[in-house]
Image (cartoon, grey):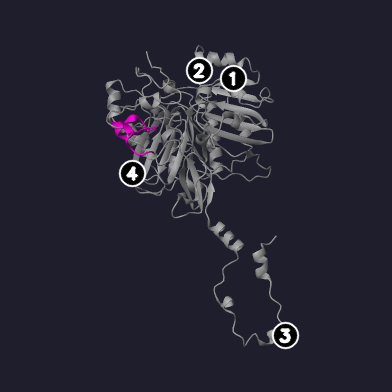
Amino acid sequence: MADASEERSRKRRRLSNDEEGNTAARPLPRTLTSPISPPPLRRNRKLESQAPKVMKSPFQLTWIQDLKASDNMDAVTLKDILGDPMIAECWEFNYLHNLDFLMEAFDSDVKDLVKVHVIHGFWKQEDEQRLRLKKQAERYPNITLHTAYMPEMFGTHHTKMLVLLRHDDTAQIIIHTANMIAFDWTNMAQAVWQSPLLPLLPKDAPEPPDSPPIGSGERFKVDFLNYLRAYDGKRTICKPLVDQLSKYDFSEIRAALVGSVPGKQPTESDSPTQWGWPGLTQALSSVQVQGNESEIVVQISSIATLGAKDDWLDKTLFKALGKSKNEMKKPKFKIIFPTADEIRRSLNGYASGSAIHTKIQSAQQQKQLHYMKPLFCHWAGDGAQHAEKPQPTHDAGRKRAAPHIKTYTRFSDCSRSTIDWMLVTSANLSKQAWGEARNSAGDIRVCSYELGVLVWPALFGEKATMVPTFKTDTPTINAVKPVTDLIVGARMPYDFPLVPYAKGDDPWVATASYTRPDWKGETWNAG
């Protein structure tokens, strides 16, 4: 129905014969010669059409049990992901598993009917974790356990993923950072990426292109199925899942897969899918970056032994992270990692620190700390030593939830107002996850299974801008100046501004002992 003012503007006053005969000689009223404003409804519609669209963050944070509702806006629980009764089959990939916790997340009416496949890396027959899983699985006839092939002694099956096949002929992929245990889904900061529901391909679907571009759904499918095929080197594990997923349409996915699989791999290969840091380099080579004063923030829960010198960190991993489609000045780097004080004051106190690891005790580890400490920033940055500093300008609502999340984010400049790309992954700061430096033969060695998702603004629109969001997945329209066509959110797990380590600050070390009580009155004895 037309607006009343618009309707009136379309009506013409009926003229008498006298008026009709003299209109040419009579001057027009001033109101007809002055500029005409569009009716209010049309004017509002025009303003609306000029306003940029906003898109929620492709990543979500997990719900934290002991935080207030305002800190958990848009956060998800495991039940949110697995509680749909339409789920027919679930493939669960992880490092640590509690099968009772997993099964409780399914809808009570179907949890005994869902076909559940659990992929773990406990290959030693006498491993306590393997024996515990086997015992738990005896209570659930619908669970099948699969042991991933683990060719590397120091590798782990570290990927955190769910693949869901549904009764409505759709499939969904969820890649996240949490172990499948209640501890990780309760009071630890974590992140989740969920694909759209993927429909079956139509029977007359055309053949996919030979080399689909990185970031497209077609390329994601190629890389994802190649990742699953890596499990079948010694025994058949994922072939049934590959066969099923090959029938689905991935075209609605806007992301690149960045993964690792164990073994020796050439860095120059005809394979469309590369793993470890070469795969990261390959993906980032497709991303146009904006700022010439950019900053990459690495936020992780574990730092392995990287070497007494910074060769691997700077010349291998940071070099890969600094890659882009267009040549830019080398970005600055920051590393977010919690201190012992931040673990003490976290929701779980010292218990949170059982999932967060680095070592600084040996002479070599002290040398590593020496070159890394200038890069270190606090997770919370609100300890007593920071009392005189201003409060954060942007509060992510996760200070007290200790970080098990892993994010790698390239900000366009040091103000961190816009984002060139963001990666959420299971991969920490380690050679086991990303791969050793290239050897003289051009090969690298990767030890672990890892999986992550990379996004950047151009995937969502030619004139899109990605901005950090805090305590919500939805960006505000005024977040970008000048205004662009589309504003995409990127949910932040940490506050702005970042707070660098001071002279007396050291990272949390789970293998050290701490006599100062946490907020619960507990001490930490690593012995």
Left or right side of 451 for 145: right
* Of pointers 1 and 4, the one earlier in the residue sequence: 1
Q: In which quarter of the image is residue 494?
A: top left
Please rate how many residues cluster around mark 3, counting C-alpha atoms within 10 Å: few if below 14, some from 14 to 19, many from 20. Answer: few
Q: Quadrant of residue 495?
A: top left
In front of the other: 522 or 139 = 522
Name the quarter where the N terminus is drawn: bottom right
Please rate how many residues cluster around mark 2, counting C-alpha atoms within 10 Å: few if below 14, some from 14 to 19, many from 20. Answer: some
Q: Residue at x 57, y 62 (%)?
A: 43
Q: Which residue is drawn at 67% across and 30% down?
A: 85
Residue 185, position in %: x, y? Answer: 52, 27
Q: Nearer the viewer, mark 4 or mark 2?
A: 4
Question: Dot 2 corresponds to which residue?
Answer: 123
Q: Separation of disc 4 and disc 3 at Cα?
A: 80 Å
Q: Separation of disc 1 and disc 2 at Cα?
A: 21 Å
* Of pointers 4 and 2, the one earlier in the residue sequence: 2
Q: What stretch is highlighted in magenta?
A: 371-391
* Of pointers 1 and 2, the one earlier in the residue sequence: 1
Question: Can you tell which mark lies on residue 100?
Answer: 1
Q: Quadrant of residue 497?
A: top left
Residue 491, position in %: x, y? Answer: 48, 39
* Of pointers 4 and 3, the one earlier in the residue sequence: 3
Question: Can you tell which mark lies on residue 330?
Answer: 4
The residue tagged with tag 4: helix, strand or loop? Answer: loop
The residue tagged with tag 3: helix, strand or loop? Answer: helix
Is residue 461 shown above or below 198? below
Question: Dot 3 corresponds to which residue?
Answer: 17
Residue 169, position in %: x, y? Answer: 68, 36
